[in-house]
Image (cartoon, rainbow, N blue to C red):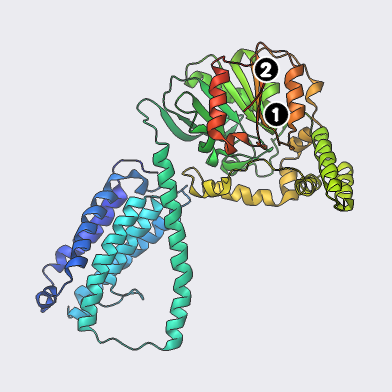
């Protein structure tokens, strides 16, 4: 997105645009000059401005070149279709008597095709390139160019009266099309704005999305930082299988001045899932997750010439992170657990009992909640777990929430595969089967079953109203472990995702504790 570079597709479109016009200069309608004098000067100015902008912009962004893996590829095919129809329109014109009526006629149902088709082509190319500048330039060109052609058509072609039913039908068809295009334009504008807001000078820093081979699979990683010499943070997402790389700039933007942050779609989920052929997730296990983490850490150590990386983990990711730290402390300089996982069953019990207490204090019927909790205790599927979470959330105090859905819509990193993965997660039974080994690990995991001594500094940031990975349990875990340095930061009114709800505060605390400015071990912000 917004990558400067030569566009051969843009050049091809301009050649397809100009060549017929060169031949037209010698094959103009006999009375063309008479009508040119009547052209609206405002529309003419828009046409000229649009021509200059479209010609320049279509050549200088390499995003307009062919990328078959892009979510927007259909728009490129559509753009080519419009240009081919444009060439066919001219062939018909050159074979005609070449009157004004021939020049301003429709083709393939497109009115004033000589003006409308190329505008539609460059508009589609702008959408394909996710480039609001090219889109706006094409709109300016379209208003002027198509406007002038419509004026000439009305001068030379008698307007036919359309039946009322046909008019109504056309309006009904056009309304959803216009709304869809407006939504697309708004999305692209938002994506471009967010891209420029967090733009990185790659001569010194790094801004990459790539797939690298980890454990025999091509796995997606996103790397962002303003200085490649800065310390490296590897962020391990939660879930399990809940990748959040498309929205990660929400919390990484305040960090990338001081750190190179790597976000990773783990095996069997998100972009990684759709990149590989193992659609049944036969290789997805917790032990494999630990091995994948080690391979990725080694890749980052080698690429960035560093002995150690910082592990930043969220929710389920903290299970992976704490186990990894104990196995490979020589490769980790510090650990940061966000929404630290301790014990799922105990955390859910506390959430349930707290919800029951609140419900009873308000005189609410608790029969349904009690039944759901018993089903959860007797069940072993994701559906029971989600039902309990939904039931308790009606009574539990809610922490601050971030509008991650809106950001995902405007994120420059959201792809069609991210949308596909979210849709896949909505089928809870199928989702559970895909990630069964990981979910079983989560349900029965007790962090106290493992060594409580860690050889690296251990830091924790949790929202005080986190009932998913209970904040009190996480705080006690911090108190109980042994580590060279440790601190637990409680985010007031925070929920399970304090890095998203209060990203600036989160980044401030991360920078403080990593700089060695630890407090008394327990603090609140």
In front: label 2 or label 1? 2
- The reply to whether residue 380 is visible in this rendering is no
Decide: few, some or many residues near mark 2? Use Cα within 10 Å; few <14, some 14-19, many ≥20. some
In the rendered view, does 512 fall on the left or right side of 48? Answer: right
Front residue of 1 and 64: 1
Q: Can you say which quadrant of the picture contains the N terminus? A: top left
Q: Is residue 320 above or below residue 130?
A: above
x, y percentage for residue 414? 51, 45
In the rendered view, does 464 fall on the left or right side of 149? Answer: right
x, y percentage for residue 501? 59, 38
Per the image, the residue denoted by label 2 is 521
Per the image, the residue denoted by label 1 is 340
Quadrant housing residue 380: top right
Q: Can you say which quadrant of the picture contains the C terminus? A: top right
Please tell me whether mark 2 sits on a helix, a strand or a loop. loop
Q: Is residue 278 above or below residue 476?
A: below
Q: Residue at x 89, y 45 (%)?
A: 374
Front residue of 307 and 478: 478
Q: Residue at x 28, y 60 (%)?
A: 140
Q: Residue at x 25, y 75 (%)?
A: 150
């Amino acid at each position: 997105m917004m990558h400067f570079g030569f566009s051969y597709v843009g050049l091809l479109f301009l050649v397809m645009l100009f060549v017929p016009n060169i031949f037209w200069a010698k094959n103009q309608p006999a009375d063309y000059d008479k009508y040119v004098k009547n052209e609206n000067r405002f529309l003419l100015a828009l046409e000229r401005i649009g021509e200059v902008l479209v010609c320049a912009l279509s050549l200088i962004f390499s995003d307009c070149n062919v990328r078959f893996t892009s979510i927007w590829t259909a728009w490129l095919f559509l753009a080519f279709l419009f240009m081919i129809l444009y060439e066919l329109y001219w062939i018909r014109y050159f074979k005609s008597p070449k009157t004004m009526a021939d020049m301003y006629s429709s083709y393939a149902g497109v009115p004033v095709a000589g003006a409308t088709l190329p505008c539609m082509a460059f508009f589609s190319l702008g959408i394909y390139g996710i480039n609001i500048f090219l889109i706006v330039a094409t709109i300016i060109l379209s208003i002027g160019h198509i406007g002038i052609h419509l004026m000439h058509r009305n001068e030379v072609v008698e307007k036919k009266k359309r039946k009322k039913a046909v008019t109504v039908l056309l309006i009904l068809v056009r309304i959803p099309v216009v709304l869809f295009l407006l939504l697309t334009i708004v999305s692209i504008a938002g994506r471009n704005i967010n891209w420029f807001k967090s733009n990185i000078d790659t001569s010194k820093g790094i801004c990459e999305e790539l797939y690298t081979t980890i454990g025999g699979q091509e796995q997606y990683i996103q790397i962002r930082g303003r200085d490649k010499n800065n310390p490296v943070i590897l962020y391990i997402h939660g879930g399990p299988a809940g990748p959040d790389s498309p929205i990660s700039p929400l919390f990484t933007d305040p960090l990338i001045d001081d750190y190179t942050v790597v976000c990773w779609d783990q095996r069997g989920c998100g972009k990684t899932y759709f990149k590989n052929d193992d659609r049944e997730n036969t290789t997805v296990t917790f032990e494999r997750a630990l091995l994948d983490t080690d391979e990725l850490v080694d890749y980052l150590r080698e690429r960035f010439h560093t002995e150690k990386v910082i592990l930043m983990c969220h929710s389920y990711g903290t299970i992976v992170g704490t186990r990894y730290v104990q196995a490979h402390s020589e490769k980790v300089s510090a650990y940061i657990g966000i929404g630290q996982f301790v014990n799922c069953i105990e955390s859910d019990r506390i959430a349930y009992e707290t919800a029951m207490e609140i419900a009873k204090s308000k005189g609410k019927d608790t029969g349904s909640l009690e039944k759901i909790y018993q089903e959860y205790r007797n069940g072993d599927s994701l559906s029971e777990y989600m039902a309990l979470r939904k039931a308790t959330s009606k009574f539990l105090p809610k922490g601050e929430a971030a509008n991650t859905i809106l950001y995902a819509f405007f994120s420059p990193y959201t792809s069609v595969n991210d949308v596909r993965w979210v849709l896949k997660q909505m089928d809870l039974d199928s989702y559970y089967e895909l990630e069964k080994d990981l979910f079983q690990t989560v349900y029965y995991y007790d962090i106290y079953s493992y060594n409580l001594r860690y050889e690296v500094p251990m830091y924790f940031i949790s929202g005080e109203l986190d009932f998913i990975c209970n904040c009190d349990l996480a705080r006690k875990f911090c108190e109980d472990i042994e580590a060279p340095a440790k601190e637990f930061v409680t985010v007031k009114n925070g929920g399970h995702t304090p890095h998203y709800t209060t990203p600036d505060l989160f980044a401030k605390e991360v920078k403080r504790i990593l700089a060695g400015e630890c407090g008394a071990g327990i603090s609140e912000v």
